[in-house]
Image (cartoon, rainbow, N blue to C red):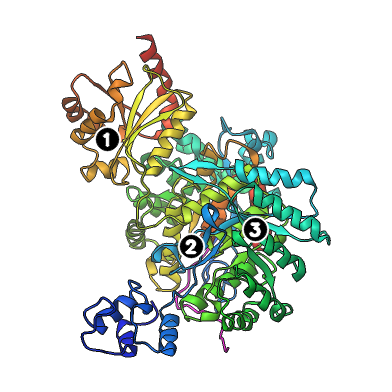
Amino acid sequence: MEWTAPVEAHAGKVRELTIGYEEKVSKVGGESILPLHFFDEGFSPNPPRFALEVWDTEPEGWAEWVLEPFGDAVRDPVEWGRKCVDFGADLVCLKLVSSDPAGKDASPDEAASLTRRVVEAIAVPLIVYGSGDEKKDAQVLPRVAEVCQGLNLLLGPLVKENHEEIGRAALLHGHSLIAQSPLDINLMKELNVGLCKFAPPERIVIDPLSSPLGYGMEYTFTIMERTKQAGVISKDAMTQMPIIADLGTECWKTKEARASKEQGLAWEGITALSLLLAGANILVLRHPETLRALKELIS
Amino acid sequence: MPIKGTDVAKKLPQRKGCKDCGFPTCFAFAMKLASGGATVDKCPYLSEEIRAELEDALAPPIKLVTVGSGEGALKIGNEEVIYRHEKTFAHAPGIAVLISDKEDEGGVEDKIAKMKELQFERVGLTLRADLFALKFQSGEKAKYEALVKKVCDAGDAGIILISEDLGALFAARDICAGRNPLLYPITKDNLEQAIPLIKQSPTPVGVKAESVEALIPLTSRLKEEGIEELVLDPGSGNFLEVLRDQTLIRRAALKQNFRPLGYPTIVFPCFLAGDGLEEILTASMCVIKFAGIIVLSDLKKDSLLPLLVQRLNIYTDPRMPLAIEQGVYEVGQPKDEAPVLVTSNWSLTYFLVSSATEESKVHAFVCVKDTEGLGVVTGWGAGKFSGDSVGAFIKKSGIEERVKHRKLVIPGKVARIKGELEEALPGWEIVVGPREAGELPGFLPALARSLTGG
């Protein structure tokens, strides 16, 4: 019986975005196919990028199998970042945990000078996440943007309440933005519409919030899958930005990931691979072994 | 459905008013047929030829195949969508564990035991692997048959028989035909020889070829012989080929309505991947990308649980919030001095609350109020977590008989129901708990101490 393989071609494409400066650059997005669908017609100029997270302060209460690969480097964000690069990370994701007002409440200046030290010391581009406190982030991230002028960080999270303040400062100093919305495709588009009033869409990455396996992963999965399809298939301009899945932190909070090393790696790895298949262009992980296995598989 | 009711009607005899099918007119019957609510055999006036044609046209685009029998029966196929958000994935893939007859006794016993032992309770469901895949590798048929018998005796899990040697394959089939095993692999080289043997005692058949396209003549030939309980293996050689082949098969069945590829599939991460983590990750890709059966090299507690949870996540109906039953749940072994918490019945909320309570090392009662699967705040917004309704629930929940104290912890995000709840529950003190479940470990121990101390 005659059969023609149902190969598909789509009209839309994800915007391509560059992170980093000089020789330390990484491009994300740019694809016109669905994730890893290399058999379809279209292009995918950049593979999914894997970041490892680095905290600006020594973490407490992490499982030993998460700390072990980094050794003493977890006491020094610069050393920790260098280790991530040694482990093959495409990007490093610095989390400004200590700026959280509910925690150490470190000042914007402290956060900014640390970020500057890290970005200069490591050989790959840098993603920076604030503490997630919308008011404090609006003080910290503009200062980080200013001090790291021209180093083209990927900076966030920008949420509905603070996107203008952070967004304008970040763009002024030559950075790209992470637009974060709570697991809802309409809120995501609203935020992007708001940002696009003053920001070029090719400077935006979408973060729809990443829930870990067993704790709502399927919601993130489906939102990412729908976002990607709306962008690539339906050419919806407000969903054509690359997607970031910041999943390591949430995965390793689960009691399952903390129960044993093997289970933790599978927990993080399955969450990451699921979200990659849904459409994530950047995956932020915590454990280098998860990173190695994922890179190996999709190469 | 690929065929419209109006097209079905054209094929019917249009006998006015016979109503032998139980419907007032041929047209009404046709509409019912097209929507899957009736079967063609209800009309006694169809020619053999038309009936076969209609049955074929009305069949689901991916055949529903059953492997195994009784309690251990696994149903796969009959999927209607490519992406879960289009509707829902219907039949979750079976997870199988490979056992070779070359493995030593201890290894075999261990895998059989793990199939029984590795069962996990989650959201009121029991998660477990489904099948044994038994591979003939020793060259000694007696040894293979002994393995098949041992596995049959051990429980009701489904069975996949894997043997290149047809003699060994069908001898094993004869031992366990009543268990409806899947026979694998049927290939272009053994197809003609196998057909009469399959027909002697029909059970499902795993068809293997070196590509998706090469499966087509094989499944077409088997269908001619009336053998349609098929499972496909396009011989994918690595992770990306699995993704490609599974996607093309699913699209062929659903978008092209191409019958020769309208069957569920089997994938073997056990033969594809490097280390244990890569194997389980490959399997997790197969869960999302359409596999009907996924064969693993071993069952390990620490990698099986994540895979089963992922299967549960991906195969939940995206249109329905996942809810758990209303009631009082125990975390640990709470006594009459234990803290009492109330939360909504979205299973994620419940999970977060119960696992954070567990982490606090405090024995407690978690009262789960039916909010139709909404979270606490949305539930409150929808009027399903109001002070009045929570109060009424607490009264009839029976918790008052189980604790001596009268302190109820409510989620911090709905602190506003405190007053209303105090009115609805005279004698109770309403304690506003943390806003996030993750903060319970910092909150509960002190509360527990105050309850036992005072």
Q: Please state which of residues A270 and B88 is positioned toward the viewer in this rendering.
A: B88
Type of the residue with mark 3: Val
With respect to residue A147, does B365 lie above or below? Answer: above
Magenta-highlighted stretch: main secondary structure? Answer: loop
* On-image quarter of the C terminus of chain A: bottom right
- Could you tell me which quadrant the N terminus of chain A lies in? bottom right
Query: Residue at position x 47%, y 77% from top?
Result: A10
Question: Residue tagged by mark 1?
Answer: B414
* Foreground label between 2 and 1: 1
Disc 3 designates what residue?
B295
Marked residue nearer the N-terminal end (1 or 3): 3
Q: CA distance from mark 3 to mark 2?
A: 34 Å
Secondary structure under the numbered disc 1 in the rendered image: helix
* Quarter of the view holding residue B368: top left
Magenta-colored span: A1-17
Residue B389 appears left or right of B348: left
The residue positioned 69% from the left and 46% from the top of the image is: B111
**Of B246 and B258, the residue lying toward us:** B258
Return the x and y of residue B356 as percentages of the image width and height.
45, 32
Q: Position of residue B48 (x, y in %)?
A: 43, 88
Mark 2 is on which residue type?
Answer: Pro
